[in-house]
Each structure stands twice: as structure tokens, then as C-alpha cells.
Image: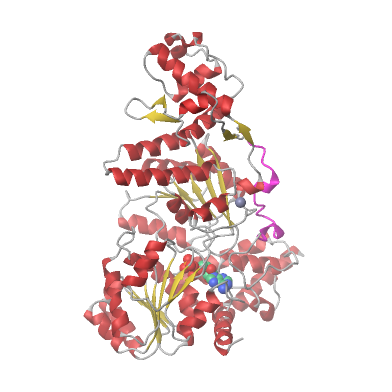
Amino acid sequence: MTDLLSRATRILQDVFGYPAFRSDQAQIVTHVAAGGDALVLMPTGGGKSLCYQVPALLREGVGVVVSPLIALMQDQVAALKEAGVRAEFLNSTLDWKQAQAIERRARAGDLDLLYLAPERLVTERGLALLDDLEIALFAIDEAHCVSQWGHDFRQEYLQLAVLAERFPAVPRIALTATADEATRREIIERLHLREARSFVQSFDRPNIRYRIAGKDTPRRQLLRFIREEHAGEAGIVYCLSRKSVEETAQMLADHGIDALAYHAGFNAAEREARQTRFLEEDGVVIVATIAFGMGIDKADVRFVAHVDLPKSVEGYYQETGRAGRDGAPAEAWMVYGLADVVQQRRLIEQSEADETYRRVASAKLDAMLGLCETVRCRRQYLLEYFGEASAPCGNCDNCLEPPAQFDGTEAAQKLLSCIYRCERASGFAFGAQHIIAVLRGERTDKVLARGHDALSTFGIGADRDEAQWRAVLRQLLTMRLVTVDHEHWNVLRLTDTSREVLTGARRLTLRQEMPRTPARKGAGRPRRKSGPARALPTPAGAAGAPPSPVAAPPLDEALFQALRDWRRGIAREHGVPAYTVLHDASLREIASQRPRTIESLAQVPGIGATKLERYGAAILAIVRAQVALDS
Ligand code: ADP
Ligand code: ZN
């Protein structure tokens, strides 16, 4: 091991309490610590922060971190202080006196890391401060904010180019989780990073299990998912509308789940209060529109649920990426149905935007629908979308319980010809519900009034229930073999390509809809309550630390809860989010290893020297008390 790497590893272990670097981290850290510039692309939760925190501690002077999100900045600083690092931030939440005190400490060389809001850095006062400091490095977090095409564009980020000119000898590291090539080029260009070495990491999040199921009673499905698989755990539920956010949160709360609504309709103070509860307390479920999430740095989110269809794979991946940043098993769970497809298509068709935009939006939606309907590995599909090849993952619903497929040609023909016959008989078209009623041979008022019980297609689909017909229709819609006329009460119409199916020239393989109450096989559900099942197929980017072949002893649930209670007290006392004191992953490890000595406690990932000194005795006392109770 090089000298630099061994010093870096020692800091990783002593300060942060982690045994080994993850995949690219070691290379990045040594490259920057040796004075090189770097561009780092890593998925959310990949571990970007250590890439600049460790070199900042290795090099002389203070590491200056530019970060656009105040909440994130504050949490990071709180976490660093918990680990015994001399870190501070300068942003608009500080009054003049507080800011001055921090500037003084920086000038006195009393800081390891200084977090700065970009608008503050680029002022004369900000630059003058930097002139006075010995700077270890500049880290530019969320570097995609320089991209004028991206949705997070920040004007002040463009001015960060000044750093290259004004401080040519200081290494700069730019970091982002936004993957695409165009953004990467923009970052290099605008931040003058042409000489920088690029580190592009896989976007895979192996600890996240992807599951997408048909929607029938979404709220009940959600309730069951949370109760049976994630009781007492933190999660995010995404809904499309404010109304749906409020109703869903209310429903969960009525069933005893600690759920909170969050959307742009609340005022800033109210939003902040809700966000803080989610961040700082254990096991809160936040029900939100997509307005929630940017800058949410909560490591122990155990699930992200979608009860409405996201507009794009990018959006879906970003939202689901908020689960499991601590590397422990987490789930991305979604239900979707026919109405989602219809609604999203309508939103695009009826939008005021220009033709190009609508074409792009429509292609993105199709890719999202493709993810929902695919019978292949979901992860493979996702990574492929981001230009990455991979093998089937073994940790998504399609891998764990391969979906049944069937030759759907005949079913499709029945449905298409029923649409055709109804329209021809009456002179106008009908919606999904009526078409399915005719297929199933139901004598509804409408069927009788129209005389559709006399059609040749009446009752030819009695072998499938309504949900199954909806699933067939949903798939025909995603393949554009049927369209919905949004201008006319959402009636169904054939398309130019329907004919190929009707004549039998084109055969279709469809995904079989699961029966209404699926008898879940054990494999489909992570068994959360026992220790060994927590072992991952491939631990999150833990290339440096292969999983131990010996199964971990089972988790002591009572001890785990006792530790969380203790942690909540400390977090409240220090006024910081609970996970900055210790991550769930660390508590879980303690609750299964039950260390009895300071030496064995020091082996637990996430417990560095400072935490050991501060909390070691308290933790051992809790373990002892619990073990005594058990015996
Ligand atoms: P990002 O900024 O890339 O989203 P973070 O830097 O917040 O990710 O890291 C995500 C989580 O992974 C954090 O909880 C962090 O403590 C943890 N982590 C990062 N690197 C390591 C490592 N080498 N070993 C163990 N945990 C790590
Ligand atoms: Zn898979």
C-alpha cells in the first residue's frame, strides 16, 4: 500500500469508523490528496462525500466545499462534528456575528472543512476570505448545477470558474450523481476541468430491490406493503397530486402509521417542520409530491413507494435512489395501472408545450412504461437505459418471481374487435369499462341500452376477470395498438397498427397479470426481521469489503430498539438528525454482534475514534443491560 493510501485508510478508520474504501473511493482520494483535479460521477448513496472529506483531512489547510443545498450542508457539518472533525458552514441561516466568528476560525487555521453556499463564495467578501486561507482543496458538490439544460441550474455555479484562475495550485474535485454525457461535458467545460481525471462509477444500487405491481386498490396495497414489510421504518411515498398526498397520508395515519404529508401547498415553515421530523426522528413515513426530495440526505430510508407513475425513468431512478443510502437492504416499490397510462398520456397531449417537447416527453413516458411491463430483470433494464450493461440481478421482482407470460394474440384480437364492433354498431366509440363489460358478457344498463348484448363479441372474454382485461388493455396501450381519445370522454380507438394484430400478421406475448390477492412466495419479500436474510446479493459498492462468509448472528430486535431510543435522546440533545449520531446499519450491527468490550465495539462500521470515546461506554451499558434482561 502506498504511503498516501495507508494514511487515507487510517483516517477512514479512525475518523469515520469504516474498515475499507468502496470501489473507486480509494483512487479518488489518493488522486486528490496528491493534488490532482477530479470529476466524480457516482450514484446517490455511492459515497461521494468521503472523496473530498478524507483528502481535506490529509492535506494541509482547510477543505472548502461548495454546496447548493442549505439543509444538506447543515446535516453534513453536523455529522462531521459528531465524528470529531472541525467543520463549519457559512450560509444565509447564520447571523452576521456567527458568520464572523467562523471566518475568524478559518483564518486562524482552526478548521478542517468549510462549507460555503455558492452565492456567498462568489462575492468579493467571500473571495477575499479565501485569499487569506491555506486551502487544502475545493470540492464542488452537485456539480451538475452548472448545466443550463438541467433542472437544477444555478447561476452562481457558472461563476465558480473563477476558482481555477484565482487558485491554480489548489486541487478541485467536482461531484455529481447526474449521469449523462452532455452534462458531464458541460461540467468539464464550465468549471475548467479539462485536465481533471474522470471517475465514473456504475450507477447500480445493488441494495435496492425493485418491485412493480399492478394497481387495484392502491391505498390498501400500500398499507399492506408498509405494515407487513416495513413496519416502524422510514420511507417516502410519492403521489402525483396534493389531494392524493393528503388523502394517502391521512389513510396511513388512521391505520397507526407515523405518516406526514408534504407538498408545495404548505408554507415554508410548515414544510421545514415536516422535513425536520422526517430527518430527525426514526420511522417516519413522508407522503409527498415530487417537490420533496432534492437534498434529502437521510441515509436510512428503507423504502420509496410510488402510487402514481413517474413521468420518466430518470425521475423514477432519482426518486428511488433516495432509499438505502446506508447500503443496507431497501426497496423501491410501485403500483401502476391502466389509469396511470391514460392520465400521463393525456397530460402530455394536452400540454401547452411545443411539438418537440411533447415528442421527448412521450418517448420518456414510453421508456417508463417499458420498465413497468418488462418481463426482464428490472435492474438490467434501468442500467441499460443509462448506458450500462449488466447481468440479471437476482434482487428485483422479475428475477425473484419470473412473471408468467402468455401468447396474448387471441386476447388482443378479442379486445380490438370488440372496440371495433361497438363503435360500428353505435356510430361512436366507447371507454374501457364498457368494452370490458361487453367482452365479459355483462348485461349492464349501458350494454342493454345500446343493444351490445347482440354483438358477436358479447361474452367472448368471460374467461378473464376485469383486472386481467385491464392488464391486457394497458399493455396494448403501451404498445400503441389502442389509443385513448382524451378529447372525447377517454373513449378507446384502434390505431394504424391494430390491423396487424387483428389479421394475425403480428403475434403478441403479454405479461400475465397476477391474481388479485397474490399468494406471495417467500422469495418475493425480504425477510426483514432475521439477521442472516439481511446479507445482500452484492453489498452496496463494497468492492473492498466482501461479505463475510459466516452468516451474521440474528438481530436482537429489543436491543436494536433500545439503541434507537438512546440515539434519539442524543440527537435531540445535540440538535442533529439521528442518523448523524450513528447510522441504522451501525446500530443493527451492534444489535447482532452484542459487543462486550470497547475493542469489539470499535470493529463496528461507522464507529470511529471520536464516537467510540463519546458513546462507547453508553452503548456497552445498553448492550449489557439488554443481555442481562435476556438471560
Ligand atoms: P452520496 O453523497 O454519494 O449520495 P454519501 O457520501 O452521503 O453519498 O454516502 C452515502 C452513505 O454511505 C453514507 O451513509 C456514508 O457514510 C456511507 N459510506 C460512504 N463510504 C463508505 C465506506 N467506504 N464504507 C462504509 N460506508 C460508507
Ligand atoms: Zn433483476
265 sits left or right of 238 in the view: left
Residue 277 magenta-highlighted: no
Q: Nearer the viewer, residue 219 or 205?
A: 205
Residue 249 place in picture, x, y as percent: 45, 45
489 sits left or right of 527 in the view: left
Give the residue furthest to the right. Answer: 631
Residue 196 place in picture, x, y as percent: 41, 77
Q: Quadrant of residue 566?
A: bottom right
Give the residue furthest to the front. Answer: 505
Residue 531 magenta-highlighted: yes
Say how the picture is coloured: secondary structure
Q: Is residue 560 above or below residue 449?
A: below
Q: Taking the image as drawn, is residue 360 in sight?
A: yes
Q: Nearer the viewer, residue 447 or 27?
A: 27
Q: Quadrant of residue 547?
A: bottom right
Residue 200 place in picture, x, y as percent: 49, 68
Q: In percent of the image, x 31 and y 59: which residue is there? A: 149
Give the residue furthest to the left. Answer: 124
Magenta region, main secondary structure: loop
Q: Is residue 376 above or below residue 623?
A: above
Quadrant for the N terminus, please.
bottom right
What is the magenta range?
A: 517-536
